[in-house]
Amino acid sequence: MTNTHQRQQPFGEECTMISGMDFIIGLLAFTTGLSVGWLLAQRKSSATKEELIALKAQAVEREKATEGKDAFVQQSLEAMNDKFENLANAALRANNKQFLENTDLKLQPLNAAHKELLKEVRDLEKLRAEAYGRLDEQLAAMQTGSAKMLESSEEMKNLLTGSSQARGNWGELLLERVVEFAGMQKHVNFKVQKQVSDGSRPDMIILLPGEGAIPVDSKCPLTSFAKAK
């Protein structure tokens, strides 16, 4: 038994030594793996950072491109709006011009009629002013004539009431006017104040065919004059 125990002791030591070696190898392997993992992680982290930087740069470029596109789109929209506004204004001006031309064509007959009416009104006003002017002149002449007639009537009244000779002369004048109004001519159909064979001098002698004659003596008594008033 002693020999068996002695044989078994080296095997245990050998196992202990093997286990220690395995631990060391495993520790080295773990350390190596950890280092390799750390290195790989560092590389992966660096790659990730680079990718992030690249992605960020791409995002910035895309943002710039988007901003440029937005600015281009905005400029295009503004240009389109300006062009549309200019076209609309041009169309509006053309429509207004056409409307005014059409309106002017339609209003031309009315304008001509209005001008003709104004001319007629001015002519009528001129004629009215001239007629009123003539009427004023006639009224003034009538007033003057009435005044003169009144004056003559007053003079005649004074004359006829003041002298019988004046009344006789007035009667002779009226008689002469009457026969002239009847179409007789002086020295052809009648004579005034011609002395006849008996020495009398009638106021008028009306000559008849065949050397006949009718003496006429005009009278204008004051009583007849008063009745005529």
Image (cartoon, rainbow, N blue to C red):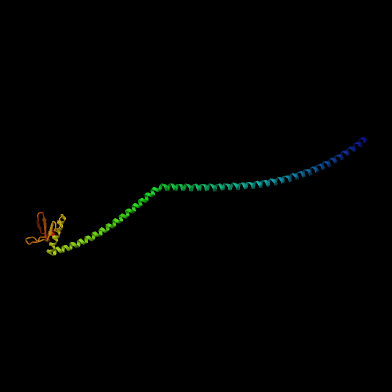
In the rendered image, the residue lying farthest to the front is 210
Residue 118, horizontal then vertical, whole percent:
35, 52
In the rendered image, the residue lying farthest to the left is 198
User: Relative to residue 125, is residue 144 drawn left or right?
Assistant: left
Residue 69, horizontal then vertical, whole percent:
61, 46
Q: Nearer the viewer, residue 152 or 58?
A: 152
Q: Nearer the viewer, residue 110 or 213?
A: 213
The residue depicted at 75 percent of the width and 45 percent of the height is: 43
Instruction: Indicate whether 58 appears above or below 181.
Output: above
The residue depicted at 33 percent of the width and 53 percent of the height is: 123
Instruction: Indicate whether 201 appears above or below 37.
Output: below
Instruction: Indicate whether 62 appears above or below 186.
Output: above
Q: Where, by quadrant of the figure, is residue 187 drawn?
A: bottom left
Residue 128, horizontal then vertical, whole percent:
30, 55
The residue depicted at 44 percent of the width and 48 percent of the height is: 101
Q: Nearer the viewer, residue 9 or 193?
A: 193
User: Relative to residue 112, is residue 70 drawn left or right?
Assistant: right
Q: Where, by quadrant of the figure, is residue 173 drawn?
A: bottom left
Q: Nearer the viewer, residue 10 or 57?
A: 57
The residue depicted at 70 percent of the width and 46 percent of the height is: 54
User: Relative to residue 43, is residue 119 drawn left or right?
Assistant: left
For the N terminus, the quadrant is: top right
In the rendered image, the residue lying farthest to the right is 3
For the C terminus, the quadrant is: bottom left
- Please give the count of numbered marks on the rendered protein: 0
Residue 209, horizontal then vertical, whole percent:
10, 54
